[in-house]
Image: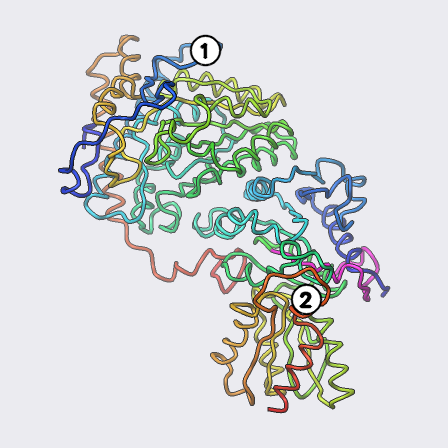
Amino acid sequence: MRRTTYIQAINEALREEMQRDDDVFLIGEDVGHYGGLFRVTRNLLDEFGEKRVLDTPISEQAFMGMALGAATVGMRPIVELMYMDFTLVAADQIFNQIAKYRYMTGGLLKVPLVIRGQQGGGKRYGSQHSQSVDSLYAHFPGIRVVAPATPYDAKGLLKTAIRDDNPVAFLEHKMLYFTRGEAPPPDEEYLIPIGKADVKRVGRDLTIATFSFCLLQALEAAETLKDEHGIDCEIIDLRTVEPLDTETVWESVARTGRLLAVHESYANCGVGAELVARAYEEAPDLLRAPARRLGMAPVSIPVSRVLEEEALPWKEEIIATVLDMVRR
Amino acid sequence: MKPADHTPEPANADEAASPAPATPEAIPDGSRNPASITTDVLPSDSATELVVPDLPTDLLLEMYRKAVTIRLMEEALLAAAEEGQIGGAMHTAIGHEANAIGAAYALRSGDYVTCTYRGHHHGLAWGMDPGKAIAEVMGRSDGFAKGKGGSMHFVSPELGMMGANGIVAAQVPHAAGLALASYLRGEDRVAITFFGDGALFQGVMHETFNMASKWKLPLIFYCENNRYSEMTPIWRTSSIEDIYMFPRAYGMATVQIDGNDVEVVHAAVSEAAARARTGSGPTFIEGITYRLAGHMAGDLETYRPQEEVERQQAYEPLTVLRRKLRARGIGGDRIAEIDEEVDETVDEAAAFAENSPWPDTTETYLDVFAGSASNGD
């Protein structure tokens, strides 16, 4: 094993899959010559040329729709949205077209493409460049939604997503890009299945189900809770939010009796609300205390550091919520 | 059934009894009202550059058979809609047939097409089966998409028919993506995408114009200008009179043609396809046509006078084709024979659809995701 960054892991996954399959190509704004705004696609143009790495005009609807067209004849486009907020610019193509194409053609066509890019707050980009769109994507049937938190998971899941015959939204996080983690050496192949959660911390008092950058916040919160309050949290990294691996979550809750879902998209109508609802529907007997969810406050994301931190459901809010749940 | 009155009965008899619809308004600045354009007198000189060779008579006969098939299927569907057998919005292509047929015969097996929700004629022109088509529109199990897509989503990948679309202009970038796939793979397939005049005012249309032209994609943009964006005449919405001028701004070859004449359409699409296959980029074709039926089944058509529709009967595709065939020495009896044969075929197709069982309700949950055991795939 070696230590590598989240960005490097994604770059390697892209490179390896492009080497493996000539039908894989990258398309998006500044992905080629510039190497991506966050340098995720750097050096790929040099290696694969302009027919595999396509710089587009700022036309999200058109290049998203073109990816769909190419995918219906077996190509495997990887579309980079510079900010996942731009999902909303291309919303018709993503939710009305890509998500529905297989269904409304009665299964005659499939759409094997990946929509990837970074989301989330923490860098003071404000209301239109900091949103988390995982819950939005998960609301529509027909798209898999993946949001890994570690370099290891990012590489293994992206490779799986590229090979999947379904459209996959692969949601990175701008706060994760320069984080480091263990991963096998480049070219040592491994794949992580979509739809499998991973227990990132074992504990006995309370289960936190989370994903993306909130995983790191939850892990930090868990250390504080352990050291200062003697509360031992189990932390499940969902990794995929469509489909949700509820089996792994219920197994954990069976031991802890408490469930807190945490994510950076809005709490209102979010993935956490879904998970908590399913807990009451599918596993009510496991809960010894009311299950709760924690998400972004119902405001647009402000720019000011203090306001942004207030709105985000990060470490301090996780700690406060866990204390409230345990002491209740 | 026989080719007959192409105007559907108004859905509501009381509405029909209301005061006669107003005649089209004069345009305040005094410019020409495009709704008065007839397809034999084109409003620009752009079509005169197009060389239109005579197509073989056998081919014209085949095209005529196809055109009558489309017409009669559309009439059968309108009848079924009036009987309450079809739900939702169904948009027929009565009057548009030549645009699809001329194009389909100008392209090769292996080429791709996408189109709008007014796409029954493209489906049939590309070889889809009328029985499965009617069954699909009626939501039956023998429909090509098992009753899940319906009227607005005709599709047949094995014929290169890659999908009709319910959202105006959404299918346009899909065709650009198909053309991109052909280009990236070094193939010589071309893609054609059909849309109406209303699609010209969607942003994605212009995004795709720019990208297709910049990347010289093997793509044909085919606008079926029937002069109405749903219920609103184009002169009420367009900032310019001749919409083929829009794509010129993107450096694209453009031509405005008589979309009701299969030979003209065939010539224009052949030329565009040759341009596409040699790497010279996309072409925009504006086929001037006319929608003889309402925007959708049940349309009250209060936005145009009946005389306007009647005037267009002289220029509609079947009339034009019959005129051509007669000029080639094909007798009225031969034409009537084809009409009879097609009538029987469409009757059989309608019967097939009506007798097709409803889908099993378990079908509701299939085809959401590919390759998932829980999804039955």
Q: Residue A103 versus residue A296: which sits nearer the camera? A: A296
Q: Residue furthest right?
A: A2
Q: Is residue A232 above or below residue B137?
A: below
Label 1 marks which chain's residue?
B
SS state under label 1: loop
Q: Are marks 2 and 1 in contact (CB under 8 Å)?
A: no
Please say if B119 is above or below B49.
below
Q: CA distance from mark 2 to mark 1?
A: 62 Å
Q: Which mark is residue A307?
A: 2
Residue occupying the point 65% across, 83% down: A322
- Quick one: B107 or A171, which is closer to the camera? A171
| Quadrant (top left, top right, bottom left, bottom right) of the N terminus of chain A | bottom right
Residue B166's disc number: none
Amino acid type, callout 1: Asp
**Overall secondary structure of the magenta stretch?**
loop
For the record, the magenta segment spans A169-191
From the top left corner, tell me how far across and down residue B281 is, in percent. Answer: 60, 24
Disc 2 residue type (three-letter): Leu
Please name the residue shown 48% across and 50% down the image: A96
* Subunit bearing disc 2: A
Q: Position of residue A94 (x, y in %)?
A: 54, 50
Tell which of B88 and A168 is nearer to you. Answer: B88
Task: Look at discs 2 and 1 and give the one toward the viewer.
Answer: 2
- Tell me where residue A112 appears, x and y as whole percent: 59, 49
